[in-house]
Amino acid sequence: MQKAVSKLYHIPFWLVYHYLWWVVAMGNPWKAAHSILFSPYAVKFVFYVVLQAIAVYFNLYYLIPRYLEKGRLKSYIGYLAITLLATALAIVSGYYLSALLAHQSVETLFGRDTNCFFYFFGEAMPSTLASTTLAMSIKLTKNWISTERRKQSLEKEKLETELRFLKYQFNPHFLFNSINSIFFLIRKNPDAASSSLARFSELLRHHLYECNDELVPLEKEVAYLRNFIALEKLRQNRGVSVITDIPEDLPAEAGIAPFILMTFVENAFKHVSKDSERANRIEIRLRAHSGTLEFDIWNSTSPLDTAQAVHYGGIGLKNVQRRLDLIYPQQHSLELRDGHGTFHARLRVSLLPENTISSPQLFSRHNF
């Protein structure tokens, strides 16, 4: 009952639909309207509207769910044929009722000499079939659109869930490494450990309070990067030269996904060569211009560490590659190069306003 009431707004549609057919048949919209409202044909018009609507909804809400959607195709075709036949015959009775109420014979009212029944049926049956086909087409189109929207929504939710998983999987990984660094310094250099702990508190604050959005201000992410580098430089007392080229004036409104850059820096410190007989170095360069961030990082490596880095041996690089694919589809380029004892990672990524509503489905497509 509630479903039937909710479909009352369909009544104007059926009235207009059948009126248009009368306009086509008579060739004059005013003559068609007068015929419907002020002639015996009004009864016939009502029979067409009401009975075909009943047949349509019986098909949509009973026959299709009960038979067609359950794969019972033969039963569905049989019951649909019976429904169409019964509806057409019922509409034919409207012709005779119109003549009865007009106190005329059907032959006189409808201008027929003989075979009135077959003529009426020949009009009612194709019209009923057309109405049913139209309604099924509209219903199937609506269902297809709804299904596509649901699929897109599920895909978007799946990607966002995967993004959150990758993001939170990375955070404990990095925190574990940082805690190890501080633990190392506590025993080796208490003063340096105190300074490291202060910087580590800034890192924790960023983790807990400032990186919950899909995008964070670039300047905050770079400040986080500087703290991490300073923390690692305190820990690295084995002849590692760290060179940074990061400008102070960054675009104020630029935003970036959190922890994207950090992964490469952490990877460089993890895989930098440890050979005491050679110069071990890490070089970091960052540029932001024309809506694009260019990030380059080099580190000297040993052959084993290089192989591990290139083949994404660690959880960090695996995650950042997946996050880049999800957050910046066709909006980033990542190059990993190994040559002459140096590993080079070069990232180019589009910068978006940090207040942009970020989603894997909302980024515009742009090829580098």
Image: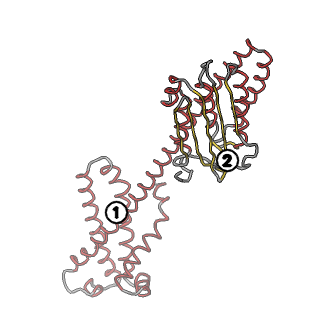
Q: Does residue 131 lie above or below 177 as drawn?
A: below
Q: Amino acid at mark 2?
A: Ala
Q: Does residue 291 lie above or below 233 as drawn?
A: below
Q: Residues within 10 Å of mark 1 (few under 14, many from 20)?
A: many
Q: Residue at x 39, y 71 (%)?
A: 49
Q: Is residue 225 left or right of residue 339?
A: right
Percent of width and height locating residue 154: 49, 44
Percent of width and height locating residue 346: 57, 40
* Residue labelled with disc 1: 55
| Element carrying mark 1 | helix
Quick one: label 1 or label 2, which is nearer the N terminus? 1
Residue 58 visible: yes
| Element carrying mark 2 | strand
Q: Residue at x 34, y 79 (%)?
A: 98
* Residue labelled with disc 2: 288
Give how far apart the Cα atoms at labels 1 and 2 are. 65 Å
Q: In the rendered image, which quarter is residue 137 located in?
A: bottom left
Q: Does residue 149 lie above or below 170 as drawn?
A: below
Q: Amino acid at mark 1?
A: Ala
